[in-house]
């Protein structure tokens, strides 16, 4: 449900982007719009909900590859914790799998970061009106892509396996048995057509499944 927005009132925006230079540039350019106010900026995904609860933004612009928690996961958190905040995902590249996950998480829009700021400003206004905004080229690509074959647990196991984590490490992090983790990783490796979990992580990221 879009928030009731009175004419003449600035749209309150939360901006989450891990690269400080990009975040500062977006905040500056959006702030030049007469009806948009960037009320909060964060560089980590695990800071988004707490910041939104304090700043009460109308719209949250979230990058995907944020440290602490991905923007896609944070979008689902906002849907549950701050339901009157609309979410726009900003991606560095258009991957159909990311678009599907964003929509499943309740995002109202999905755009690539290298678009003109005026287009982004219009998207902010559109999602506040209750519209859904998706990059046209990405929407077309998503229509031709199959669904994500990985289960939520398989995605979690792959994500937790980066940086040389052992099976025991992953089991502790996910509160699962080591045998369950092995099964989930084996299944994920098979579904991605990879030879090992490192290759499976790369393949899943390339498809936007992770």
Image (cartoon, helix red, strand yellow):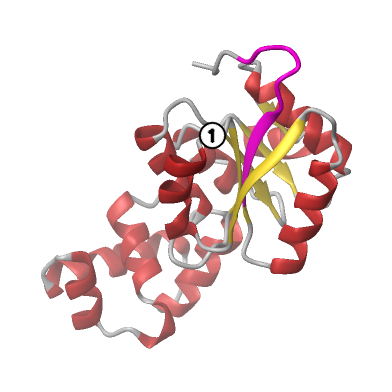
Decide which of 55, 141 is in the foreground and name it: 55
- On the rendered structure, is 58 left or right of 190? right
Which residue: 49% across, 76% down? 199
**Measured along the vertical axis of the image, is residue 169 above or below residue 144?**
below
- On the rendered structure, is 56 left or right of 126? left
User: What x and y, as percent, mark residue 48?
Assistant: 48, 51
Count how many numbered circles sit on residues in the image: 1
Secondary structure under badge 1? Answer: loop
Residue 73 visible somewhere in the drawing: no
- On the rendered structure, is 32 left or right of 94? right
Which residue: 62% across, 65% down? 18
Which residue: 72% across, 57% down? 92
Q: Which residue is mark 1?
A: 107
Residue 203 sits in quarter: bottom right
Report the magenta residues as a range.
Answer: 5-15
As for residue 55 lying within the magenta part, the answer is no
Decide which of 191, 88 is in the foreground and name it: 88
- On the rendered structure, is 162 left or right of 44? left
Which residue: 32% across, 50% down? 152
User: What x and y, as percent, mark residue 36?
Assistant: 75, 33
User: What x and y, as percent, mark residue 184?
Assistant: 26, 63
């Amino acid at each position: 449900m879009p928030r009731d927005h009175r004419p003449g009132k600035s749209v309150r925006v939360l901006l989450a982007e891990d690269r400080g230079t990009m975040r500062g540039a977006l905040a500056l350019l959006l702030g030049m719009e007469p009806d948009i106010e960037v009320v909060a900026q964060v560089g980590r995904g695990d800071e988004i909900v707490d910041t939104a609860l304090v700043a009460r933004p109308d719209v949250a612009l979230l990058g995907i590859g944020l440290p602490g928690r991905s923007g896609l996961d944070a979008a689902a958190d906002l849907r549950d914790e701050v339901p009157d905040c609309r979410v726009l995902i900003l991606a560095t590249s258009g991957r159909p799998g990311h678009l599907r996950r964003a929509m499943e998480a309740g995002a109202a829009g999905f755009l690539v970061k290298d678009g003109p700021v005026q287009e982004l400003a219009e998207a902010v206004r559109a999602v506040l009106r209750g519209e859904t905004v998706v990059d046209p080229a990405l929407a077309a690509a998503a229509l031709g892509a199959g669904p994500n074959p990985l289960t939520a647990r398989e995605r979690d196991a792959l994500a937790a396996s980066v940086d040389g984590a052992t099976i025991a490490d992953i089991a502790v992090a996910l509160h699962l048995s080591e045998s369950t983790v092995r099964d989930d990783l084996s299944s994920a490796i098979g579904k991605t057509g990879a030879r090992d979990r490192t290759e499976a992580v790369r393949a899943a990221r390339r498809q936007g499944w992770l």
